[in-house]
Image (cartoon, helix red, strand yellow):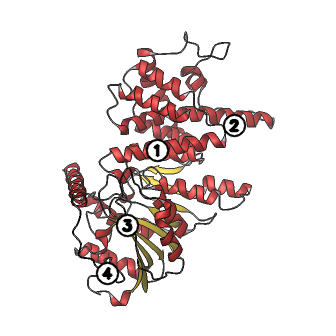
Amino acid sequence: MFEQTFKNIDDILHKDAGCGSELDYVEQTSWVLFLKYLDDLEKDKATAAELSGKIYSTIIAPEYQWSAWAVPKNKDGKLDHHHALTGDDLADFVNIKLFPYLKKFKANAESANTIEYKIGEIFSELKNRIQSGYNLREVINRINELRFRTHAEKHEMSHLYEGKIQNMGNAGRNGGEYYTPRPLIKTIIKVIDPEIGQTIYDGAVGSAGFLCEAFEYLKNSKELSTTDVVTLQKKTFYGKEKKSLAYIIGIMNMILHGVEAPNIIHTNTLSENLADIQEKDRYDIVLANPPFGAKERAEVQQNFPIKTGDTASLFLQHFIKILKAGGKAGIVIKNTFLSNTDNASISLRKHLLETCNLHTILDLPGGTFTGAGVKTVVLFFEKGKPTQKTWFYSLNLNRNLGKTNPLNENDLAEFVALQKTFADSENSWTVNVKDIDQNSFDLSVKNPNKKEEATLRQPQAILEEIKALDEESAQILNSILELV
């Protein structure tokens, strides 16, 4: 039922003049979903308070509650069409009264970790783009069919919402910006193997895929005590996100996975000066996929000891700095980071090898990120001891990855098994850091166990690479234009 409801909502938004893309569909569905979720949450809290003989004070004032404006009921418990707003009346209420009311929550909240603050932040950041009040009425009626009360319902909703994020990533120019393949995230988390009590951070949180999957991993890691539940809800997951749409989607995604008030802050992580990061600001684990191909302004670069316009390289400096001593990281980055010859890349590789144990590099095939068209690697490192040896694993598949044939966990099973002991194989080998060029610190992936075969490339493979390079060039050009 839920899946059909989502499809129906997309069909409604497709015919609305204010919604022109998959990104708009997800954004607009998200704010209406959020308000329905909030209504169900308040009902659950009120019931729990009543059972324990307490009185529950609602977060939302009566006239702004879902049951008052969205779905007023008649005596039979059905939608009261005489009191349910629609058309211009509904659009005016949402735009002129509801959004400004919800926006005020941010200023009045006790702290950024409260659900009240999240309400204010979300409705400060977005606008109702559904121009037709009649279309909005249809969307509300559809979303009202959804329930968030049981674990099974929340699980199904989170699964469907993830699907929408994936479609948005595929449709968007920067596919990897919104959607890191979940099999890859799950594999990174398996290797890192977090424990309850450790803090987990993603400074480029996007749709919060890393945090959601880490929550699922820890939630199922053992029988949870009451203390464990509180720890997972309030003291484990932290994130920062610059872009408004990604911030909203990340919050909603975590909520649907079961984190009630996600500790995600809407800010540009790179605007923070590295020199200002203190011990109290550091985390046990960093999991992230920072943006590829983006460029940062000169004033942002001043916050970093190694100056570069490359966003991913700035993020890597940030992640190294914000890790606690002994902390672990799994970071997705473009494979060109391993061999770039510019001074900043060389300095950053040297810094990483000297301050952290870069114990594992996972080399991923092209097409891993659907729509992004870039080759990537995953860097696994621990902070505090210099690197002596790095174990490489090159993922070689006998098929081309793409939208209809994506990466799966089975593809990465051998990597996970071999990584435990850093075993050599046809696809894996170990490099001693003292044997690499001490001037360039080049870490290029060169598998010594694989014989090069002189075979002609298939025309389709050549065309796919040309397409990927074109997309990457367009991405870089757009990033430059945004700075002008």
Q: Circle 1 sits on which residue?
A: 163
Which mark sits nearer the N-terminus, 1 or 2? 2
Q: Which residue is mark 2?
A: 45
Q: Which residue is mark 4?
A: 451
Q: Is residue 65 left or right of residue 339?
A: right
User: Mark 4 belongs to which amino acid?
Assistant: Lys
What residue is rendered at 75% in x and 36% in y?
A: 49
| Earlier-in-chain disc, 3 versus 2 | 2
Q: Is residue 479 above or below residue 6?
A: below
Residue at image position (54%, 66%) is 190
The CA span between labels 4 and 2 is: 63 Å
Q: Secondary structure at mark 1?
A: helix
In primary-sequence order, the first of circles 4 and 2 is 2
Callout in the foreground (4, 2): 4
Residue 387, can we see it?
Answer: no
Q: Position of residue 401 (x, y in %)?
A: 36, 58
* Residue type, label 1: Gly
Picture disc at residue 364: 3
Rendered position, 440 above or below 15: below
State the CA–CA distance, disc 4 to disc 1.
39 Å
Nearest-to-viewer mark from 4 and 1: 4
Type of amino acid at the residue the image marks with label 2: Lys
Other-residue count near label 4 (Cα within 10 Å), few / some / many at <14 / 14–19 / ≥20: few
| Mark 1–mark 3 distance (CA, rounded to whole Å) | 23 Å
Location of the N terminus by quadrant is top right
Q: Earlier in the sequence, mark 4 or mark 3?
A: 3
Q: Residues within 10 Å of mark 1 (few under 14, many from 20)?
A: some
Q: CA distance from mark 1 to mark 2?
A: 29 Å
Q: CA distance from mark 4 to mark 3?
A: 19 Å
Name the element at disc 2: helix
The secondary element bearing badge 3 is classed as loop
